[in-house]
Image (cartoon, rainbow, N blue to C red):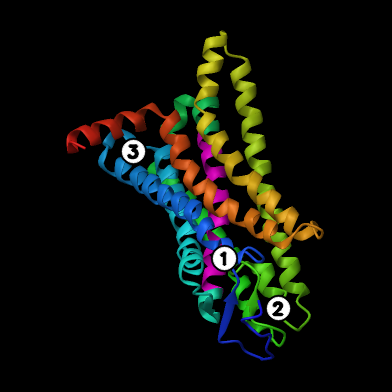
Amino acid sequence: MSAYNITKFTNPSTFILLGIPGLEEAHVWFSIPFCTLYSISILGNSTILLIVKREPALRGPMYYFLCMLAVTDLILSTCTLPKMLSIFWFNAREISFTACLTQMYFLRCSSLIESGIFVAMAFDRYVAICDPLRHSTILTNHVVAKIGLAVVLRGGLLVLPYPFLTRRWPYCRTNIISHTYCEHIAVVKLACADTRISSYYGLFVAFFVPGLDVLFIAVSYAQILRAIFILPTKNARLKTFGTCGSHLSAILAFYIPIIFSSLTYRFGHNVPLWIHVLIANFYLLVPPMLNPIIYGVRNRQLQKSLFQFITHKGI
C-alpha cells in the first residue's frame, strides 16, 4: 500500500484496487486458478448456449431458463475477472470512477437476476412434478418470456440505486479499495459522509430479496416433496426427485458462498482482510464454473446433444 499514498479529494477520477491485500507477492500464483476457473466458465456456459440453440429437442422452459442462467453467469464472471487478472499479471490497479460504478452495478444486478432464475426454475419443477399434464399449457413460451423479463427488470431496477447513491457521496479519505473489484460496501466505506442510506439499502438487497427467493424455492420444494412421497413405488419417487438434482445442486453452489461471504464481510471483524477478499471472490468464480458442469453431468439430453455435436464436427 505504500506505493499509493492516501490522498484527499472530493470527486475521485479513479480508484486503486489492491487485489488481495497482504498477498500481493502471490498475485501471479492466484491468477492461475482464477484464470482456469474463468476459462472453464466461459467454455461451459458458451457450450450450453450453443447446444440449446442448435438442438430443437431442447426447446422448453427448463432449457430457456438454463440459457438465461448461462448468460447471467457469463456477465457475472466477465464483469470482474478480466480486471482481476490485469491486476495479478500487469499490476494494472487503476479503475475509473465510472467503470467502478458500472462494474458494481452489473455485479449486483447479475447476482439478483441469477437468484430470480433459480426461483423460476423451482416453479418449472413444481409444475412439471405437481401438475405434469398442464405443464405445457401453463409454461408456454409467452409465459416463460414474461417470467424472464420480470426477473431481469427486478434485478436491474433494485440495483439501480447502488451507483446513484454511491456517486452522490463525497470521497475525501482515500481512493484505495482493498479488494479485487468494486464491491459495494468497500466503496461506500471510503466516503466521508453519512452513508447509512447506502448501507441499509445494500443490506436490504443483499439479504431480504434473496431471502424471499429462498423462501419461494423452499415452498416449491415442499410441495414437490409432498407430491413425490405419494408416488406408489420407491423407484418412481427416486426417478422423479432425480429430475430436481441439478437444480438443487446449482442452488446450493450459488447461495451458500454468497451467504457465507456476506456474513463474513459484515460480522467477521476479526477475520484477516485477505480472507474476506478470497471468500468474496469465491461466489464470482465457482458458481459460474459449476453450473454448466452440474447440468451437463446430470442431464442426459444435454449429454446426448453435446456428443452428437462433437461427433458431427469430428472433434
Q: Is residue 118 above or below residue 235?
A: below
Q: Main secondary structure of the magenta part?
A: helix
The amino acid on which the numbered mark 2 sits, given as a three-letter code, is Leu
Say what secondary structure mark 3 lies in: loop
Q: Is residue 311 above or below residue 173?
A: above
Residue 130 in percent (x, y) is at 55, 26
Residue 84 in percent (x, y) is at 51, 64
Residue 307 counted in the magenta span: no
Count residues near mark 3 (Cα–Cα under 10 Å), then give few for <14, some for 14-19, many for 20+. few
Residue 53 in percent (x, y) is at 29, 44
- Residue tagged by mark 1? 157
- Residue tagged by mark 3? 59
Kindly tell me whether residue 44 is visible in this rendering.
yes
The amino acid on which the numbered mark 3 sits, given as a three-letter code, is Arg
Residue 112 in percent (x, y) is at 58, 55
- Residue tagged by mark 2? 190
Kindly tell me whether residue 150 is visible in this rendering.
no
What range of the chain is rendered magenta?
101-124
Residue at the spot 74% in from the left edge and 54% down from the top edge: 264
In the foreground, 53 or 271: 271
